[in-house]
Amino acid sequence: MDYRALLTIPLVALVLTASGAETLRQPTGWVSFAGWDGLNSPTHEAGVAPETENSSQRALTVKAIGERKAHQIGSIFQGLTGYADRRIRFSAQVKTAGVDQWAGLVVGSGIHPFYHVPDLQEVEAGAVAPRGAAGCPDWCDVSVVADISAASGGIATVGLALIGNGQVWARGFKLEIVGREVPVTTHRFGAEAAALNKANGEWVEKQMRNWGATPPQNLSLQ
């Protein structure tokens, strides 16, 4: 087996414009992102779990802020370079609470802002869709295996994500290169959220088609 432990977190982070909440401490090398509900209300927050700050093993957490919709996503992740044509395994212990949609580890080939709900066609294109493995109500070992293509520039995005409500924690991160005999994770991250988002968009379009014509207002600019 072509298998070797590479490193434990932190790794190299991408410099991106974060839209996540900043109330939790952001560890060096990680970037938190969340969707927005209105102009100034992020849907989730992510960072180091405060209750683990002084423990022997810190944990990352992502939690919903208020009541969230089923397709809204919060995440914390980092981008890595130099993995072209490699198969990698991203592992950690993961715990969830009150999750009504999905929460767990995610690995994507290329630059993937995990907070963004993907297009359903993109998710169904299995070769490019990020892979995900869900956590458990109690601490459990979770791992995601994914191929990183040369077409992505050898960039891999790894992280922790939460769709919908609840909270997720992860600790003891590890990244490894594995051999081709290790199967790729089959679950496509964001598939459920993409389907819900598509259905919601179709419903909105149907309602709009039934609206009456709206005349323009104040064309004389009074």
Image: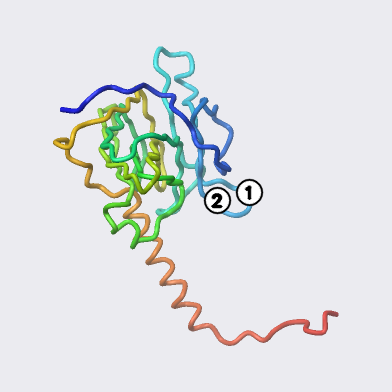
Residue at 55 percent of width and 27 percent of height: 25
Give 59 or 79, whichever is nearer the viewer. Answer: 79
Classed neighbour count for the residue bearing mark 1: other residues with Cα under 10 Å, few (<14), some (14–19), many (≥20): few
Q: Residue 28 in the image: x percent, y percent?
A: 52, 25
- Position of 21 with respect to 92 (left or right) is right
Q: Which corner quadrant of the image does residue 9 belong to?
A: top left
- The span from disc 1 to disc 2 (Cα, nearest Å) is 7 Å
Tag 2: amino acid:
Trp
Q: Which corner quadrant of the image does residue 222 belong to?
A: bottom right
- Position of 191 with respect to 61 (left or right) is left
Q: Do labels 1 and 2 touch, CB within 8 Å?
A: yes
Give 161 or 87, whichever is nearer the viewer. Answer: 87
116 lies above or below 146: below
Determine which residue is flagged by label 2: 36
Give 64 or 119, whichever is nearer the viewer. Answer: 119
Q: Residue 2 in the image: x percent, y percent?
A: 19, 28
Residue at 67 percent of width and 86 percent of height: 215
Q: Find numbered disc 2 in the image and state the secondary structure of the residue it sits on.
A: loop
Tag 1: amino acid:
Asn
| Rendered image: mark on residue 169 | none
The answer to whether residue 114 of the structure is visible from this angle is: no
- Position of 171 with respect to 221 (left or right) is left
| Rendered image: mark on residue 40 | 1
